[in-house]
Every structure is written in structure tokens, then in C-alpha cells.
Image: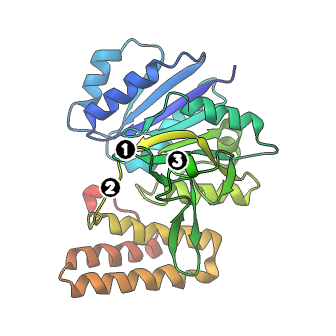
Amino acid sequence: MAGVSAVIVTYNNKELVLKQIDRLLKTDRENFHIIVVDNASSDGTAEAIESRWGENPRLSLVRQEENRGGAGGFRRGVEEALKGPFDYFWLLDDDAVPREDALDELLKAAEEIPGPWGALGSLVAQEEQPELVTETGGGILWLRGKLTAHNQNSLIKDVSPEPFIVGHAAAASLLTRRDVVENLGFFEDIFIHFDDVEWCYRIGRAGYPVYSVPRSIVHHPFKKGAAPGWIRYYDARNILLVYRRNRPWLMAVPFLRFRLMALVFFLRGERQTAHYILRGQRDYFKGKLRLRSEL
């Protein structure tokens, strides 16, 4: 049986990640291992995990010295998984709730899909409205500088269960193969946002397409309302990375879109958010990345 390592990244989400570990340890699959990367949490997450499961051979805890975000956390976790006898790596958010057969459905698709594949993403449904789809992977509107989400706001029952190729799939629940990571590398260390997008397009260009697997379902909190202003730094910075590697002749599109966005925030009196956007763009062209603590 193929070995699977689940990789979870957490930061100050103690109760959620403890529940996630409880769920995954109930998996009866042989050669299944869990790696939890704690991004220097200050809420006692690492201590609680060690206290409860410190001697469990199916669980490894990796403690980061600083918060490297989801991207840096997943990179560190996959580096650890590569040391073990695992054929597949399953990325999973600490607040995602997979249905009992979510991993089984990904592994079935892994065997059924003809030809090479690079990553398989689950259908992400809302936690608050469990039958409502958040996405089944997505794409990019290159001439508008925006992401799209397939089947967003559809009902799960209305989505075809057959796997289909997408531009990218969310790291909320994403399965990949050892050989893909060994040959093509993994996420860029860009803290958050566009890490899974950049990587999916990178492996797709190399001939390893990304698929959505709607039969594999995870529920995830649906965040309504405006994002915190600091997140705009990573959006503005990291989308330029995606364009430079995929559509360099169109880099003016996201650049101008976020410049206009900064102007709108400035005129609305949200000057700090405008500052984050402009700093993100400047830092990209300088080859610089600031961590959350440095913004």
C-alpha cells in the first residue's frame, strides 16, 4: 500500500489543530503519518501536542523558530516528509474538516487518472453551509489579474463527480507525489497567498497537470468581508511572481490593478492598506520578502 504523509501547518490555532490531529489519527491506513508544523505559536500549541501525543509514532511535530506563514510551513513539512518512506504528500489546513473518505477519494483518483499528474485537489465546501461549494480548483483571468473559482456557490450535488483539469487547486486539501516534488521543487517561501497557485502552474508547465477531484470533500470556514489590510502586501507582491513566470508580457495587468486598488483605499481613508500594496510591489521588484512581523 502506498505510503501517505499528511502535512499540516498551524499558527495559534491550538484547539482546531488538536481536533484535526484527533481526526487523522483515526485513519486506519497503513504507512500513514502526520507531520504538524507549528509556526512559532504563542498559545501553547506545540506543548499541547507534545503532551498528548509526544510518544505517538504516527505523528511528528516540527517547531519553527519564527512564523513563516503557510508557504514556509508547508515547505518545511514536505522537507520532513521527504525523509520518510512516503509516496504521497497530503497538504491539509488546520481548520479544514475532511470527510471520512476525502483521502481515499484522492488516492482512488491518483490510480484512475490516465497519464502523469502533479496535484489533486479536493472540493472545498463551506463549513457554515456544508452543501455549498467554495471552489473545485480555479484559474486566472490573465487579462484582468484576478483568480477564478470553479463551481463557486454551487451545491455539491450539482457538481459532476469526475476529476477535471484546473489551473490550480487550494492547499486546504491537496495531494501530490514524491517524484513531482523531487523533480520540480515545492512552494516558494512567500509567506501566504499565491504559493499554491504559483506551484500548480509551475508543475503544469512541466507536464504534470493539476486536477480537481470533486468526490473528495473538505469543509472549510468561509471568510466573509474584507481581508485584513496587511494581507494585501502578499497579494500585491506574490501575484507579480505568478505573472512573471507564466505571462511576463502581461505583468502590467496586475501591477496596474493593484496600483488602482491602492488609490481606492487611499481615497477611502485606508492609507495603511494602500501602503501595504505599494510596499508589496516595491519589495517584489527588489527581490525582498517581509514576514508578517516585519510589516
Quadrant housing the N terminus: top right
Q: Residue furthest left?
A: 269
- Asked which quadrant contains residue 96, the reply is top left
Q: Nearer the viewer, residue 49 or 141?
A: 141
Which element type, helix, strand or loop, lies under badge 2? loop
Q: Mark 3, mark 1: which one is toward the viewer?
A: 3
Residue sitting at x 38%, y 38%: 94
N-terminal of the pair, mark 2 or mark 1, is 1
Numbered badge on residue 156: 3
Is residue 102 rendered to the left or right of residue 221?
A: right
Which class describes the residues within 10 Å of circle 3: few (<14), some (14-19), or many (20+)?
many
Quadrant housing the C terminus: bottom left
N-terminal of the pair, mark 3 or mark 1, is 1
Q: At label 1, which amino acid type do we have?
A: Glu
Which element type, helix, strand or loop, lies under badge 3? helix
Residue denoted by label 2: 223
Q: CA distance from mark 2 to mark 1?
A: 10 Å
